[in-house]
Image (cartoon, helix red, strand yellow):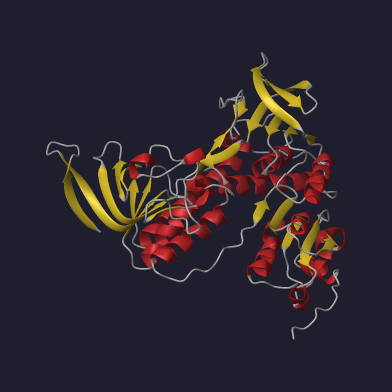
């Protein structure tokens, strides 16, 4: 990396220190640090600008702390439900938080060290464009730093939006950051939104003994998942005494004198209802975040709040790319990682690996993993579809775990036998779905799955059983 001084900066001399590099990465989340390390391994000089701790939302305020709380509270719930244990269970909230914070701290330190070991230069501060390929970094008390790069990857993540009438106060009305802090364990909480984050936090708080109500404006839970999953998930939550209100929209909040909060909701029949609870959690929807980047100065178009880009993730400016949440939905860390790897390979002149297959995972209780098309979507697309099914109630491993609710669904093209999707509700679904990703990514058929010997006794056998349950007519050999 070369350093120079250019006119127009701060300081007595009127010059600003400038560095040049092959690749500038803006944002240190999974997409950003993956791109930086892969590019450095490929021989490029790389600078990464991050205003906060490394790891972005995923490591600091999202995936990692949420999953840590889920694991600890799931253990609490398992002990509480165990038929062979007696007596009261005392929960140490402070120690739960301490473990969560320790896991985050170690992980952030680990990824920071890994990035540095690859030879990436980390610049702490907020970047803003001064021209395509040129940024200035506000480093707080230090002098600003100018950076000129041949290539730029924007990996600035996303931020939540809550809609009119709903405002976070961090006390009674929480966002997911405040919900992770667990300042208190409320007696009751209303969670607005039943997507991934909504049902995961519902599990966390229900495991801690909180009375949970989920408010969802769509007609079913997890509206992006297979409709069977949404229905069965609602039953599972009902068995845990979690109230679910679908076709219901949250429109306003009102403080109560007893330190609680009133959530005003409207049902699709036009009737209003008021829910009095200790806390309200707004999960919101997400939108790309470009705060302070001055994209217009770089000639970048953000029509409709999204940065215009092509299939290669390159924007309207040559050499400037956008990946991860900043590129729009789905807002998944593994999507960001895949896109970043593809962009860096393109910069390095490597052949494209093709379009990645991206699975969705819900880490609540029960878990959900899904990839590819549902049978309904496949039929609409014109495929002659058959559906392989297996239920965990017939799985010995699931029974031994005491988690035998759920199923595996495999939509298959009846003519070619190709696996079109996989949808799993049940224990370890977020791990099992990797089998579906492998099947679709490699064009496997249902017969390929049937020929695969999976260990006994495991949950993975359920994928084999779903495949074995489906019998297709032999395909006609090509002349």
Residue closer to the observer: 37 or 438: 438
Query: How far across and down, in percent of the image, does residue 95 sit?
Result: 59, 41
Q: Residue furthest left?
A: 13
- Between residues 206 and 294, which one lies in front from this camera angle? 294
The x and y percentages for residue 16 are 19, 43
Q: In terms of depth relative to the viewer, which is nearer, 7 or 334? A: 7
Residue 187 in sight in this render: no
What number of labels is visible?
A: 0
Q: Which residue is at 75% across, 67% downward?
A: 460
Q: Residue at x 30, y 43 (%)?
A: 137
Relative to 168, 134 lies left or right: left
144 sits left or right of 306 in the view? left
Image height check: is 332 above or below 93? below
Residue 358 in the image, given as x and y percentages of width and height: 61, 58
Q: Is residue 197 above or below residue 412?
A: above
User: Residue most toward the front?
Assistant: 479
As drawn, the residue found furthest toward the top would be 257
Q: Position of residue 27 (x, y in %)?
A: 42, 48
With 476 as the anchor, is 196 left or right in this view? left
- Residue drawn at x 18%, y 39% is 8
Whether 324 is drawn above or below 117: the answer is: above
């Amino acid at each position: 990396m070369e350093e120079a001084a250019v006119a127009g900066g701060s300081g007595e001399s009127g010059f600003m220190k400038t560095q040049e590099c092959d690749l500038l990465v803006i944002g240190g989340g999974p997409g950003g640090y993956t791109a930086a390390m892969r590019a450095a391994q490929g021989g490029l000089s790389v600078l990464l600008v991050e205003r906060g701790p490394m790891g972005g939302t995923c490591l600091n305020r999202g995936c990692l702390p949420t999953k840590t709380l889920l694991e600890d509270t799931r253990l609490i719930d398992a002990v509480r439900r165990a038929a062979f244990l007696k007596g009261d269970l005392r929960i140490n909230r402070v120690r739960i938080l301490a473990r969560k914070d320790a896991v985050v701290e170690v992980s952030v330190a680990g990824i920071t060290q890994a990035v540095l070991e690859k030879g990436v230069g980390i610049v702490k501060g907020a970047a803003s464009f001064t021209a395509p390929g040129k940024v200035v970094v506000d480093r707080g008390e230090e002098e600003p730093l100018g950076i000129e790069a041949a290539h730029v990857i924007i990996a600035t993540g996303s931020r939540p939006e809550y809609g009119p009438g709903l405002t976070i106060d961090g006390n009674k009305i929480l966002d997911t950051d405040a919900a992770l802090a667990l300042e208190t364990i409320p007696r009751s909480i209303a969670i607005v939104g039943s997507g991934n984050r909504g049902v995961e936090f519902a599990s966390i708080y229900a495991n801690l003994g909180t009375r949970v109500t989920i408010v969802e404006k769509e007609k079913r839970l997890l509206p992006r998942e297979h409709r069977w999953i949404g229905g069965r998930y609602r039953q599972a939550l009902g068995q845990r005494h979690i109230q679910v209100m679908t076709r219901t929209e949250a429109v306003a909040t009102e403080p109560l004198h007893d330190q609680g909060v009133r959530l005003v909701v409207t049902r699709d029949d036009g009737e209003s209802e008021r829910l009095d609870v200790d806390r309200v959690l707004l999960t919101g929807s997400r939108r790309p975040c470009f705060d302070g980047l001055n994209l217009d100065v770089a000639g970048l178009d953000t029509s409709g709040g999204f940065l215009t880009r092509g299939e290669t993730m390159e924007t309207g400016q040559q050499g400037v790319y956008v990946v991860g949440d900043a590129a729009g939905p789905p807002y998944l860390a593994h999507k960001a990682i895949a896109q970043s790897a593809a962009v860096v390979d393109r910069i390095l002149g490597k052949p494209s690996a093709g379009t990645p297959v991206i699975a969705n995972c819900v880490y609540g209780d029960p878990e959900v993993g899904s990839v590819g098309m549902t049978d309904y979507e496949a039929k609409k697309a014109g495929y002659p579809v058959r559906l392989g099914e297996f239920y965990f109630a017939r799985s010995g491993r699931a029974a031994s775990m005491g988690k035998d609710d759920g199923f595996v669904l495999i939509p298959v093209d009846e003519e070619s036998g190709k696996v079109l999707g996989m949808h799993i509700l049940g224990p370890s679904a977020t791990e099992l779905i990797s089998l579906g990703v492998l099947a679709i990514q490699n064009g496997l058929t249902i017969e390929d799955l049937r020929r695969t010997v999976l260990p006994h006794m495991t949950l993975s056998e359920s994928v084999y059983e779903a495949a074995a349950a489906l019998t297709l007519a032999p395909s006609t050999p090509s002349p």
